[in-house]
Image (cartoon, rainbow, N blue to C red):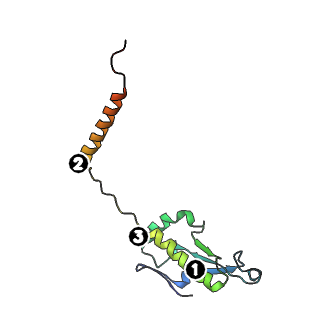
């Protein structure tokens, strides 16, 4: 197994990844009963040397619900009939999970509405109020 490169900032060493294989429940007919094609990939982000301290803290916060009690992230793949394709796919899945978790939302800058948008909003409210007022009683009851 080789190192897993995830973008320009993160590379996970092969020694940090642990693969295990079991019989799959996916497609494959009788082959499913004979060959261990399901791949489980385990990685512990808290002890990973491939992450900066800044990225590690953020990643642990974002992935907290997906980590086991031991702090491992487990990604499983049994979509394909062969172990080799599942091994490749599980690495892609892990990369995708990490990349999505490392995306930081843009900070929102407080803005003010423009003068014309305020005027349009107030004009609309005034028109609506006039329309509702015109529906009311005529003012003279006999």
List x then y, in percent, for residue 57. Answer: 45, 67
Give the structural element (helix, strand or loop) at label 2: helix
Earlier sequence position, callout 1 versus callout 2: 1
Earlier sequence position, callout 2 versus callout 3: 3
List x then y, in percent, for residue 130. Answer: 30, 32
Residue for point 42% across, 68% down: 103
List the residue tagged with mark 2: 116
List the residue tagged with mark 1: 89
| Gap in angstroms between the C-alphas marked 1 and 2 | 53 Å
Camera-side residue: 126 or 18? 126
Q: Residue furthest front?
A: 142
List the residue tagged with mark 3: 54
Badge 3: residue crowd in 10 Å (few <14, some 14–19, many ≥20):
few
| Gap in angstroms between the C-alphas marked 2 and 3 | 43 Å
Q: Does the residue at mark 2 contact the one at mark 3 (Cβ under 8 Å)? A: no
Q: Quadrant of the N terminus?
A: bottom right
Camera-side residue: 83 or 12? 83
């Amino acid at each position: 197994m080789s190192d897993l490169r995830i973008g320009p900032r993160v590379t996970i060493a092969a020694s940090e990844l642990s693969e295990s294989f079991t019989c799959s429940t996916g497609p494959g007919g009788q082959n499913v009963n004979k060959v261990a094609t399901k791949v489980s990939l385990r990685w512990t982000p808290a002890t990973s040397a491939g992450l900066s301290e800044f990225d590690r803290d953020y990643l642990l916060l974002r992935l907290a619900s997906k980590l086991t009690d031991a702090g491992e992230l487990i990604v499983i793949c049994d979509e394909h009939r062969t172990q080799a394709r599942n091994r490749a796919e599980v690495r892609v899945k892990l990369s995708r999970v990490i990349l999505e978790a490392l995306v930081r939302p843009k900070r929102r800058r407080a803005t003010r509405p423009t003068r014309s948008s305020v005027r349009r909003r107030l004009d609309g409210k005034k028109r609506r109020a006039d329309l509702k007022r015109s529906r009311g009683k005529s003012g003279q009851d006999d």
